[in-house]
Image (cartoon, rainbow, N blue to C red):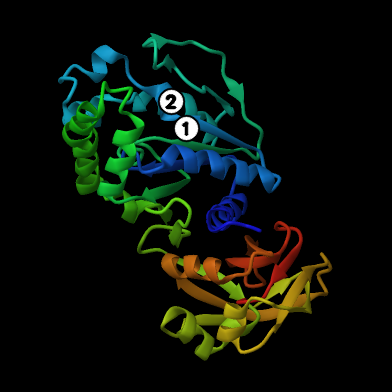
Amino acid sequence: MITPRERVLGRIADHLVGLGRPLRVAVDGITASGKTTLARELTAAVAARGRSAAHLSMDGFHNLRAVRHRQGRDSADGYYLDAYDFRSFSRLVLEPLGPGGDHRYRERIIDLRSDTPLDEPPITAPDDLVLVVDGSFLQRELEWDEVVFVDTPFEVAFERGTRRDTELLGGLPEAQRAFEQRYHAASRRYLDEVGPAERASVVVGNADVTHPVLHRIGGAADAVVNLFSYGTLQTPPVQVEHFGRTLAGKEDVLPGYRQDWVTITDPAVIAVSGTDRHPIVRRTGDPADATSGTMLELTTTELAAADVYEVDDYRRALVRLGSEAEAWVYLAGGHGANSVDGSVA
């Protein structure tokens, strides 16, 4: 049975798989928020959906120790401003994988443990690569295609980080001092100056690692996204029950798909929709086939709520409607070329 964590990571992976290629994805957050673990699991979830995926850590793009510590070993400003070589990272990773790039990128430029510069040959990325990068302060200077912000309270991250780094930093008191004076002091400055959670395209609450919460997906806090609905979500009572309001929408069609029906067993879905019989459409590729529905406008918080509501058999993908507008739809079990689900759609 799928765990709550696997479910949330799967929804984020579905979102990434539905976007352009190659895709540069940051996993951002305060120190010890759980970025590295989430990045590795997200990379695996993307790969499990049939798309090329790789994980890269910003540990390989630190500045040399003499630069990192030039303002003092405990300096928060030194950590915030001097820890990472963002300029080299942009030149050697983000630009090659961006528009017009040659897809040849570097995995690291330093061995952090030995403080030794590295000059390793570049890797050639496949055209469909999703590169997932974890690190701190990733929205301060860098431009990404998608940003996942791992939202963990300071008190939770402090307990995790000091326990994790007790041996590395010479004991628990030393670890606690380092987090208070350097790591989390720098993280607070980052939150104040940049507002990374508001800018991120995905926000995941990670206070409880076994039950993460998908707060937002699909864009920044003020973004609006399109979701094509051909089922119960078109009805105002279901919209009010699910989102607390009625949604703006326009009639549209999904070309090349034919409607069928599916029986839903999730009690929560049945309770909201009032029925266990929901429409499902399958891709035929025949231009004579089309499914009528409504293109709804949702906030990114509402899209996250729709993702959470959807039963696990279905995945979300980006399609072009008859109006030529792009919209998200829910797929039955497969990827974008397969069938579209209507359990809330």
Amino acid at circle 2:
Arg
In this rendering, would 37 be left or right of 286? left
Is residue 319 placed above or below 100 in the rendered structure?
below
Q: Are marks 2 and 1 in contact (CB under 8 Å)?
A: yes
Is residue 294 among the parts visible in the rendering? Answer: no
Where residue 264 sits in the image (x, y, percent)?
A: 70, 78
Please name the residue that numbered disc 2 is placed on: 91
Q: Residue at x 42, y 55 (%)?
A: 204
Is residue 26 placed above or below 57 in the rendered structure?
below
Q: Quadrant of residue 224?
A: bottom left
Q: Quadrant of residue 77?
A: top left
Observer-nearest of 331 and 248: 331
Where residue 158 sits in the image (x, y, percent)?
A: 27, 41
Mark 2 Cα shell of 10 Å, populated few (<14), some (14-19), many (≥20): few
Which numbered circle lies on residue 94?
A: 1
- Label 2 secondary element: helix
Amino acid at circle 1:
Leu
Q: Residue at x 45, y 56 (%)?
A: 212
Task: Tell me the distance, in whole angstroms, between the alpha carbons under discs 2 and 1.
Answer: 6 Å
